[in-house]
Image: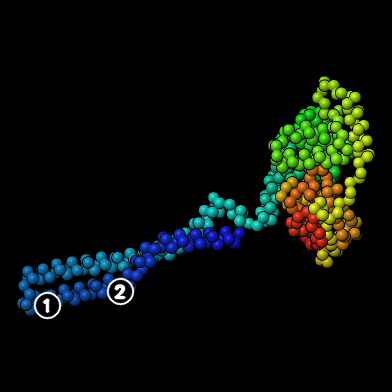
Amino acid sequence: MTYFYLAAAALVVVALALLLRPWWRAGRRITSADSLPVLNAAIHRDRLAELERDRSNGTLSAADLAEAREELQRQLLDDTAATEVVTADRFSRSSAIAIVILLPLIAVAMYALLGSPRAVLPGEAQTQRASAEMEELVVKLAKKLEQNPDNPEGWAMLARSYKSLGRWDDAERAFTRIGPTLNSNAGLLAEYAEMLVQKDNGFSERPRQLIQQALRLEPENMLALFMGGGDAFDRGSYAEAITRWERLLPQLEPGGEDARMVEASIAKARERSGGAKPAIAKADVMPGAVAPQDDVHRAAAKAAQGAAQAPAAPAAAPTATSVSGRVEISPALKGKANPDDVVFIFARAVDGPRMPLAAKRVRAADLPLDFVLDDAQAVMPGATISSVPQVRVEVRVSKSGQAQAGKGDLTGKSAAVKPGAKGLRIVIDQIDQ
């Protein structure tokens, strides 16, 4: 931001230097003109009186007097012209001063009107401002929908907005207000399920039902396949997870970030299943199609056998798959935290989705607390601490007991760190307003 302001000031100085160059030269010729017209008039009157005396004394003829008068008139005109030049020079100096003042003001006004002043704000300030603006828009949209509730598209938009702000309860209410359209739209059902998983930091029965319903409506829906694979992986149905993710993979850009994440998830599911061939999920079969039941049972049995034989995943050590440190509350805020208040400790990608990469839940009475967040605590198998270049650990003492932000919550966060960072010290020293 400082560099931008310095560069802009330098450009203004250069522009002023070029524009004012003619006035510098003119300024050298400027003399005081306050008494010049009066002085010229007095001199010419004295000379004219002298000529009249010479004519009265007989030393000057009438013809010579007339010629002398004409010469005086010419001189007076020349002196007047010179005075006008000096006055013009003085006017030019005033113009230069006006340019020096007006040019920067006009530049600033034009930038404010046509430019992007917020672009020079620090990244955190930009985020806060964008969040505040979005909150304002969401409030307006909510008021409009209360006046006209028969608007499924509007409720879907409001639900997505609440979801992006982390207001999970409001998002859930907005999804339920969509109406019958929700139950016939696979995309909305998958978004609803995703929101519930984010809200609860894991899969529960309700999002599982929504995912199954979405896949029955649209077996190739990308978000439903992704969430369905995550659900199957969470339940230990690795073959089913592989099936769904392999159906998703051809729809993604080859070599892209999403494709690499899904490929990593498939590889992890194969490792957990002992290399079992994927089963065909019954819920994903198109209506009217017949699933090869024998193959399903054989694959499921093999997957279960592989899962039983596969060794348990080793506990993550504080290496490139984890971050660790200590959480404490500042002395100034200790009195504002009740012992039974829920404390959420979670890691998020610095550049990426807001869904936590890993999370744990404790009580305020446990603070200060040494913590480790690792890939074993991932909500989605492909979205892990080890899968991103930088993470930030955030802590929230929730007054409502919910993971979403609430007024009066006590918060703290670390700086951006790389996976494997140890010895982080996170002080809870902020209050959400």
Identify residue type, mark 1.
Arg
Q: Quadrant of the N terminus?
A: bottom right
- With respect to residue 386, does 226 lie above or below? above
Along the line of sight, the residue nearer the viewer: 228 or 19:
228
Residue depicted at 7% across the width and 75% down the height = 60
Instruction: Residue 94: give x, y in percent of width and height.
Output: 40, 65
Identify residue type, mark 2.
Ser
Colouring scheme, one of rainbow, by chain, secondary structure, one colour: rainbow
Is residue 127 visible to the viewer in this orientation of the structure?
A: yes
Instruction: Residue 104: give x, y in percent of width and height.
Output: 49, 60
Residue 74 found in image quarter:
bottom left
Label placed on residue 35: 2
Direction from residue 44 to residue 221 in the image, left or right: right
Instruction: Residue 103: give x, y in percent of width and height.
Output: 47, 59
Earlier sequence position, callout 2 versus callout 1: 2
- The 10 Å Cα crowd at callout 1, few under 14, some 14 to 19, many 20 or more, is few
Residue depicted at 55% across the width and 54% down the height = 112
Label placed on residue 53: 1
SS type, badge 2 = loop
- Looking at the rendered structure, the number of numbered marks drawn on it comes to 2
SS type, badge 1 = helix
- The 10 Å Cα crowd at callout 2, few under 14, some 14 to 19, many 20 or more, is few
Instruction: Residue 167: give x, y in percent of width and height.
Output: 78, 47
Q: Residue furthest bottom?
A: 57
Asked if the residue at tag 1 contacts the one at tag 2, i.e. Cβ–Cβ closer than 8 Å, the answer is no
Residue depicted at 85% across the width and 29% down the height = 280
- With respect to residue 414, does 259 lie above or below? above
Quote the CA–CA distance across marks 2 and 1.
27 Å
Residue 189 found in image quarter:
top right
Q: Quadrant of the C terminus?
A: bottom right
Along the line of sight, the residue nearer the viewer: 385 or 65:
385
